[in-house]
Image (spheres, rainbow, N blue to C red):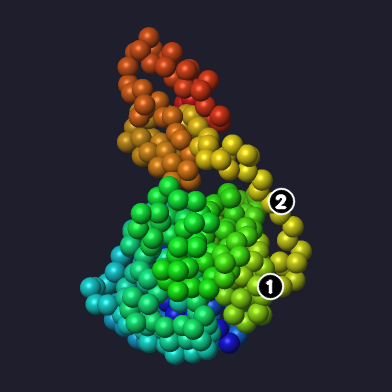
Amino acid sequence: MITIAGGVYRERCMRPAWDDIYGSAGRAATAIARFGGLAELHACVDSDTQIVIEARAAAENFSFNPQVSQIGVNFEYIHGLATPDIRRGGDAESLLQVTAEKVLRFGMVDGTAVVNAEYAVFDPQNADSPESFNANGSTARHLALVLNRHEANLLLPGSNGMHPEQIATALATQENAEVVVIKMGPLGALVYDNGAISTVPAYRTERVWKIGSGDTFAAHFALAWLDDCRSAHDAASIASLATAFYCESQGFPDKALLAEFKPETLEPSERYRNGYAPKVYLAGPFFTLAELWMVGQARRDLIDMGLEVFSPYHDVGLGTAEDVVEKDLEGVHDCDVLFAIGDGLDSGT
């Protein structure tokens, strides 16, 4: 049995259309149950959310231990890669207190979960100021951290410029963790396990659904490491594959589905592994406010993926053909790849 502590929130996305109640902890409960694991979910929820999760728990065979609150939390996305607008019904902070043998704990936007466990997996889930596992009084004899590179840098002050292996080792010491898993996008995940360091690959998918992908990774890692007694490396390998399945299908695999899922591993080039950031030429119309917004969103998300972006609007500006065409063409020649926004069938694009 894995006890899950964290947030359950409503998630709404305009494009592609999505409107459901999951949040980190709710999604992890579904992911573990669909894969055949036993899960008990602890979360603070309002009365409407409680009804939904109780019905899902009955259908999917996980236990639900709600702490009823008057405050609900909504995550509003304009698109699947957008930074969400987080809307809370008030300022009250939720407090979960969980004592169990095996716990998967997530960071929360509406409070915190104090955990006392024999074994714990902790995903801070905070892009601004992730907290240490024990900062709120949580304890675990055996602790695994699962976090992305950005969160790892924030959790370890002064780590910018350090190699991931050094960050993982320092975090293990700082947080008294036996295992540290750092997710690194196309480079896969680095796994620190009691001094041994290994990597697992990321996978190529036909489609990408980012919302909840980190929750899925943490859930499958926890199930494999906590319940199935897999090594941290093997648990991260399973988690990476299950996350690729989720990103491609927006669904949760059972064991049979995951066994049949055979995506290609991503093989980043040597120059990318050595720190090279590919340069993207961002082509698209920017004559209306909507077009400017679209270009701005694409530019921001490409930069967030670690790419260098040349945007004619941002890097050259408006002007006559004599002023801008030659500079735009130089930008095309200097880039590794061209990303074109086809909306509006703009002739210049």
Type of amino acid under label 1: Asp
Q: Is residue 207 left or right of residue 79?
A: right
**Element carrying mark 1:** loop
Query: For residue 262, which quarter of the picture?
Result: bottom right
Report crowding for label 2: few under 14, some 14 to 19, many 20 or more residues within 10 A (C-alpha).
Answer: few
Q: Residue furthest left?
A: 91
Q: Earlier in the sequence, mark 2 or mark 1?
A: 1
Quadrant of the image containing the N terminus: bottom right
Residue 42, visible in the rendered structure: no
Crowding around mark 1 (Cα neighbors within 10 Å: few <14, some 14 to 19, many 20+) is some
Q: Residue at x 72, y 68 (%)?
A: 257
Up-down: is 31 above or below 263? Answer: below
Position of residue 282 measured from the top left corner of the image (x, y, whole percent): 47, 31
Image height check: is 57 above or below 194? below
Q: Position of residue 297 (x, y in %)?
A: 40, 42
Q: Residue at x 61, y 65 (%)?
A: 196
- Name the foreground residue: 339 vs 189: 189
Residue identified by numbered label 2? 264
Asked whether residue 171 appears in the rendered view, the answer is: yes
Q: Does residue 292 appear left or right of residue 65 in this picture?
A: left
Q: Amino acid at mark 2?
A: Glu
Q: Residue 46 at what x, y percent from top left?
A: 35, 80
The residue at 47%/18% (across/down) is: 330
Q: Is residue 67 left or right of residue 145?
A: left
* Residue indicated by mark 1: 254
324 vs 103, nearest the viewer: 103
Residue at (27% x, 72% y) in the render: 89
